[in-house]
Image (cartoon, grey):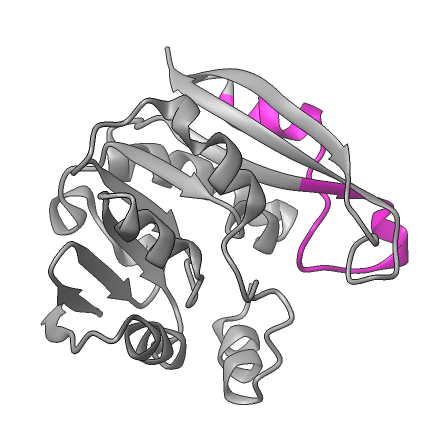
Amino acid sequence: MDPDFWHRKWADNQIGFHEGETNALLEAHFGRLDLARGSRVFLPLCGKTRDIAWLLDQGFCVAGAELSATAIKQLFEDLGLAPEITTIGSLDRHSAPGIDIFVGDIFDLTAEKLGPVDAIYDRAALVALPKEMRTAYAAHLASLTATAPQFLITFTYDQSKMDGPPFSVSEDEVRRLYEIRYEVTNMLRKDLPGGLKGQFDATEDLWLLNPK
C-alpha cells in the first residue's frame, strides 16, 4: 500500500482504525501465550495503540514498527514518556525504558536492528495490508522474530461492500500464510458487535500461532 495513504490518514486525523481503549481480546486472552514478565512483545504497524500501555503495565517490554512519525509522537505523549531518538539506516528508533519503536517502512527493519522478540501481537497489521502484500509480510515477520509465537486478530466480511482497510482475511488465507511455519489455532470466532465501522456485518477471529 502507498505509504502516502497512511501519512495522509494521520495528518488529517482520519484514524477510525485507532481503538481508544485496550483491545478486549488482548486483555481476556493474551495470557494464553504464557509469557514471563519482562518478555519482549513486538507490535507491527502499531500506531499509537492503547494496547502498548496495557502491555507495559503487565510487566512486558514492547517493540513496535510504525510508518507514521506523527503516530509515534502521540504515542509517547500519551505514555508520558520522552523518547531518545536515534537514526538507524532509514529508520528512527524511539526508545524509553521498556519500549523501542522503529519509525519507517517495516520492510527496512531487520532482525539485527529489532533485537530479540518473545512474541508478536498483530491486531491491525495483517488486516491493514492488501492481499498482494500479505505473503511477503508474513515471511518478513517470521524472519524478523525467529518465528516467535503470534497472537493474531483478523476480520472477515463481504469485501465487495468495502475496499478496506481493514481488509477481510479468511481462515483459508490465514492458514495459507502461516501454516508453513506455525501450528495455527483458532481460539475464538465471534460476530463483531455493531458490525465493521458500524455498517457491515463482520466476524472477528483470534488466532494463536505457535512455531512448528
Q: Is residue 59 above or below residue 103?
A: above
Classify residue 48 by image quadrant: bottom left
Which quarter shows the N terminus?
bottom right
Q: Is residue 56 above or below residue 188?
A: below
**Residue 53 in view:** yes
Q: Nearer the viewer, residue 130 or 164?
A: 164
Q: Nearer the viewer, residue 201 or 56?
A: 56
Residue projecting furthest to the bottom: 12
Q: Position of residue 26 (x, y in %)?
A: 49, 41
Left or right of 84? Residue 174 is right
Residue 161 lies in the magenta-colored region: yes
What's the residue at 19%, 69% (across, down)? 94
Which quarter shows the C terminus?
top left
Q: Position of residue 84 (x, y in %)?
A: 10, 74
Q: Nearer the viewer, residue 139 or 121?
A: 121
Left or right of 194? Residue 77 is left
Left or right of 94? Residue 160 is right
Classify residue 169 by image quadrant: top right
What's the residue at 46%, 43% (across, down)? 122
Magenta-colored span = 155-178
Q: Position of residue 65 (x, y in %)?
A: 33, 58
Residue 194 lies in the magenta-colored region: no
What's the residue at 53%, 74% (across, down)? 6
> How many marks do you count on the picture?
0
**Residue 181 in view:** no
